[in-house]
Image (cartoon, rainbow, N blue to C red):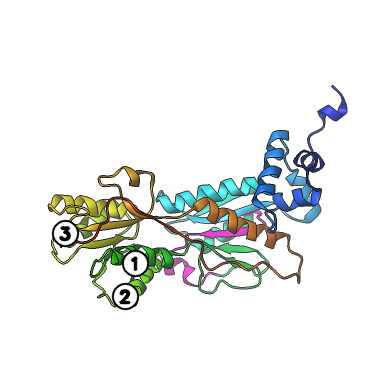
Amino acid sequence: MSDARRRPPSSTDVAALAGVSQKTVSRVLNGEPYVTEEVRERVLAAARELGYRRNTAARALHLGRFHRIGVASIDSSLYGPASLLVALERQAREIGYAFAVAYAGEGAGVTSAVESLLAQGVDAVVISDPIDDPINGDQDLRVDPDVPVLSFRPIPGLDGPRVVVTGPSGVEAGRQATEHLLGLGHATVWHVAGPHRWPAARDRARGWREALAAAGAPEPPAPEGDWSPASGYEAGRALAADPRVTAVFAANDDMAIGVLRALAEAGRAVPDDVSVVGMDDIPAAAYLSPPLTTIRQDFEAIARHGLALLAAEIERSPGEPGEPGEPGLPAHLVVRRSTAPPAK
C-alpha cells in the first residue's frame, strides 16, 4: 500500500469530493452561517464517506482552543430537556466539536456546572434548560465575558458581547395552544402549569395569559404541577369536578396524560366534554386514546441553529461583529382528536 493510500483523509480531500472550496469545508465544519443546507449536507456526506476526522489536539495547540463545547444541563429524564441534550450532542459532532456535559442538580446549580466545564477546558458553554436556584446563586448567573455562551432563553445577569440567546419560544407555544382552543369556541381555557421555578413553565403560562387577554376571555386559576403525569392527574381531578371546564392546556404532554386519566375516571369524555392540549409531542402522544393535540418543538433545528451561532462566535476575531441570535424559534401545533368545539 502506498503512502498516499495510508495517509488519513484531509479537508482538501473532502473539498474535492464535495466539489467545493476548502473555505466552504471549513465554514461547514465550524458551523458558520451563510452556507446553504444543500452544500452543508454535501460536505458532511463527503466527510463521512472519507472517514475524515479533524486533528483536534493539533488544532488546539495551533489556535489555543480545545475544540470542545460544554453544556450545563439539568440532570433530567424529562422529554424536552433530554431531547434537546441529545440533539446538541449530535449537532456538535456534525460540526466537528467534542462535547462535554456538566449536570446541575441538587447541591450543584448552573453556576457550578459552568465552572466545572471551564476547568475541564472548553471553547464555549451552552446553558440548557436553566431553572431558578437561589440556593446555588443561579438567580444572577455570570460567566467570564471572554467565554462565548449560548443560552436558550434570557437569564438575568447573563449578557455581554459573546452571549448568544436563541431557542424555542415557550410564550408563543402557550399562545398557540390557547388560541387553538379559543378558536374552537371555548369560552376560556384552564391551564395546568409547570413548576414556577422553571422559566420554560413561566413562558408557557405567559403565552396562555396573553392569548386569554387578547380574546377578552376570563383567566381561571392555574394549578401548578411538577411536569409528571401524577401531578397532572391531581390537577385534573379538581378540573374534572368543575362543570365549567371545557378546555385545558397542560404545560407538557406528561401532565396532559394525567389530566386525561382524571377526566376519564370522572366520566367526562375527551373531546366531547373537555378538550385537552399538551406540549412536546412525546412519541406516545399520537397513540393515546384519543390521540393528543400538542405543540411540537423541533429540537434538531433548535440545536443546529444555536450551535451554528455559537461556533461562529468561537471563530470570531476580537472586534469583529457577531451574529445576532433570534428571540425564539417556531413551535408547531399538531392537531389530533383530543380537541373539538364545546358541546352545545
- Can you identify the residue that label 2 sits on? 215
Q: Is residue 96 visible?
A: no
Q: Observer-nearest residue: 153 or 248?
A: 248
Task: Residue 326 in the image: state x and y as whole percent.
Answer: 56, 67
Q: Observer-nearest residue: 262 or 39?
A: 39
- Amino acid type at image mark 3: Ala
- Amino acid type at image mark 2: Ala
Task: Residue 7 in the image: state x and y as whole percent.
Answer: 82, 32
Label 1's element?
helix
Q: Mark 2–mark 1 contact, CB under 8 Å?
A: yes
Horizontal relation, residue 19 to residue 343: left or right? right
Asked where in the image residue 309 lies, by quadrant, the reply is bottom right
- Can you identify the residue that label 1 sits on? 179
Earlier along the polypeptide chain: callout 2 or callout 1? 1
- Can you identify the residue that label 3 sits on? 240
Residue 138 located within the stretch drawn in magenta: yes
Q: Which contiguous range is marked in magenta?
A: 120-141
